[in-house]
Image (tube, rainbow, N blue to C red):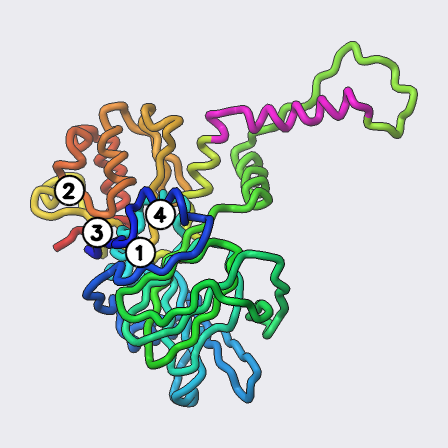
Amino acid sequence: MLTLQLNQFSLEDFLANYWQQKPVLIRQGFPGWQDLISPDELAGLACEPQIESRLICRKAGQWQAQNGPFEQYGHLGERDWTLVVQAVDHWSPEVAALVQAFMFIPQWRFDDVMISYAVPGGGVGPHIDLYDVFICQGSGRRRWRVGERGPHRQFVAHACLLHTDPFEPVIDAELTAGDILYIPPGFPHDGVTLEHSMSFSVGFRSQPARNMISGLADYLIDHELGTGLIHDPGRPRQRHPGQINASDFGLIRQQMQAVLSDAALMADFTGAMLSVTKCELDLQALEWPLNSAELLSRLQQAALVRTGGLRCLYLQENIAQGICYIDGEKYVFSAGCVPALINLCDQSWIDAAQLGEALQDMDFVEALLGWVNKGYWYFDE
C-alpha cells in the first residue's frame, strides 16, 4: 500500500492551514513512485462504453475534445493531446489502493481517481475545479501553474471544455514522479506535459444543497414519507385571499423544517444518498455462488477486499443501533455487529478477526454472503 509522506508539515498542519484554503506542492509525497497502471491499460479502459473518458487536443491553436469510447489512437500524433479516464479506481485494484493514502478525509467526500496520459504539449487548458484534488504525478514530467482564487472569467473553449482567462501563478513548478500538487476548489490551474507522462488525480467533493434537496425529495417520494398536511384549526378570517400572510408562511416553513428536524429520517436519507457511487462499479458476481458455510471457511484462509469505488458508510448518529449504508441501501444488524460494521466501512481490506463476533450472527453472515456473491467484496487469494 502506498504511504503518503508529508515532509514539510504534519497531516494536522495540512488540514488546519491548507485544506480548502490554499494550494501547496508536496515534493516526493510518494517517494519511489511506480505507475499503478500503464498507458496501454488506460487506453484499453477508454475503449469500454461504460467507462467515462475524453480525448482533448489542440490543433492550430484551437481546443478540441471528444468523449469516449475510443477505438484507436494512432491518428493523434506525438504532440498536444491528452487522454483522461474517470473513476479508474473502480476498475483497477492497484489504483483503488491509492485512495487509502488519502483517507484522512472521510470517504463520503471522496469522488474518484481520474487518470490522464499526455504527450508533450498535452493538457486540458487553464480551468477552475469545484472540488479538492490531489494531483499525483506519475511517470514523466508536467509543468503546473496555479493562480489565486478570485473573480476569474470563465468561457467555453469547446462544448466539453470550460476554460478561464490567463492568470498570474502563485505556484509555477515542474512535477516529477512522486510529487503531489494539492489544489482546493476555486483556484485556476493549468498543467502542460513536458514529456510522455501519467497523472493520477484523487478528487474530493461535497454535494451542493440543490442536489441534497432534490435527493431528499426523491427519497421522501420513494419511501412515502413527508405526506402530512398543514393543520390549522381556529384560523382567523382571511381578508386578502391572494395573500400568503406571515402566519401561513410560518406554517409552510414549519412543515418543511419538520422533515429536516427528523433526525432518523435525515440520517437514513444521508447515508443512502452519499453511499451511492456516481459511476458504474466493476462487479464480478461469483459464477458459482458460495453458501454460508463455504464463506466462513474461506474467511479463515483469506481476507476480503472491497471492490474499487464501492461506498460503505455509517453515521455517528445511529451506528450504535447497528445501522450502515452500502451502495444506497440501509442495513440493520444487532448491536453485537457494530465493531464489524465499523471495520467493514473504515477498511478496504478485512479479515475474520476484524469481523469478530459478527460472524456468529446469521443475519450478518447472510448479508455478507450476498455482498460477496454479488461482487461487492472478493477474497484476496
Which secondary structure type mostly characterizes the magenta part of the structure?
helix
On the image, which quarter does residue 248 sit in? top right
Mark 1 vs 2: CB contact within 8 A = no
Q: Amino acid at mark 2?
A: Asp
Which sits in the foreground, 150 or 255?
Answer: 150
> Residue 378, labelled with which disc?
3
Mark 3 or mark 4, which has the lower sequence index? 4
Q: Is residue 253 above or below residue 29?
A: above
Q: Amino acid at mark 4?
A: Phe
Name the quadrant of the N terminus.
bottom left
Mark 2 or mark 3, which has the lower sequence index? 2
Q: Is residue 355 above or below residue 147?
A: above
Question: Which is more foreground, mark 2 or mark 4?
Answer: 4
Counting labels gives 4
Which sits in the foreground, 199 or 314?
Answer: 199
| Position of residue 225 measured from the top left corner of the image (x, y, whole percent) | 56, 29
Name the residue carrying label 4. 14
Residue at the location (56% across, 28% down)?
260
Name the residue carrying label 2. 351
Q: Amino acid at mark 3?
A: Tyr
| Position of residue 194 measured from the top left corner of the image (x, y, whole percent) | 37, 80
> Residue 283, labelled with which disc?
1
How far apart in space, not on screen, are marks 1 and 4 (Cα)?
35 Å
Range shown magenta: 245-266
How busy is the neighbourhood of tag 3: few (under 14 within 10 Å), some, or many (20 plus)? many
How busy is the neighbourhood of tag 4: few (under 14 within 10 Å), some, or many (20 plus)? some
Name the quadrant of the C terminus.
bottom left
Is residue 255 magenta-colored? yes
Mark 1 vs 4: CB contact within 8 A = no
